[in-house]
Amino acid sequence: MDTLTLTIPSRTAMARKLAEAFRSYGVELRHAEATRVLATVLGENEHTLAAKLDQTRTSPGNAFMREGRGLEQARLLQALVKARLELAVQVPALGGVRTCVATAEQALRLLEDKDAVYGELVGLSKPDYIEWQSSNGSVYCCARTKVGKQCRNPVSGGTWLEPPAWKALHDAKGYCAIHGG
């Protein structure tokens, strides 16, 4: 499950309870005084808000229930963004994840098209992000073998590259050592 982390200053017992309620939505709250902030944004009493969140948690069920949770996630994100909270997204990267700060618009689109948002956060288009991930950050030779297939050797110095370096080398259409690179 992907995690959306919201960074909010301070800590309270109520915020810990609220953070637990948000985990079922795939949202993780850190350094909470979250209830007070959210209650202000939503115009609710903080205890009432925590109780409502407990009631809205549902286990995985039919498609209608999953769609309802998606709408609740979108409403929750809109409220949090309205409060000008920083949204940190854990983006799958080489050897694990990297934490990137997302805009409000990106956070809302994360629910619909993760790869496109992940790509934007690391500076790649959606197709480039998918290719970068599937190649484990490697750029392959653009030459053809004797039988006409694409060479699968990496370009010299083209393995485990970060997105900007991968994109530059990928666009350069380089060759492996065997094919003159």
Image (spheres, rainbow, N blue to C red):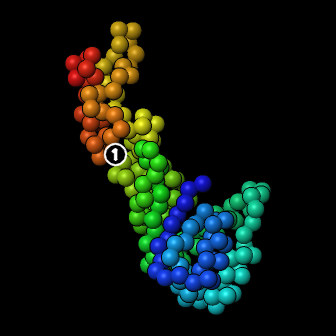
Between 165 and 108, which is closer to the camera in this rendering? 165
Toward the right, the furthest residue is 62
Q: Which residue is mark 1?
A: 163
Asked whether the viewer can see residue 101, the reply is: yes
In the current view of this chain or complex, which residue is farthest to the top? 146
Q: Tell me where residue 8 appears, x and y as whole percent.
A: 48, 77
Report which quarter residue 75 is drawn in: bottom right
Q: Quadrant of the N terminus?
A: bottom right
The image shows residue 24 at horizontal and vertical percentages of 66, 65
What residue do we see at 26% from left, 40% from top?
168
Q: Amino acid at mark 1?
A: Pro
Residue 176, how many percent across, how many down? Answer: 28, 22
Tell me which corner region of the image, top left, top right, bottom left or bottom right, holds residue 85: bottom left
| Left or right, 54 with reference to 31 | right
Residue at x-position 38% and y-position 22% = 152
Q: Write the residue at 29% across / 27% down.
A: 155
Q: Nearer the viewer, residue 52 or 82?
A: 52
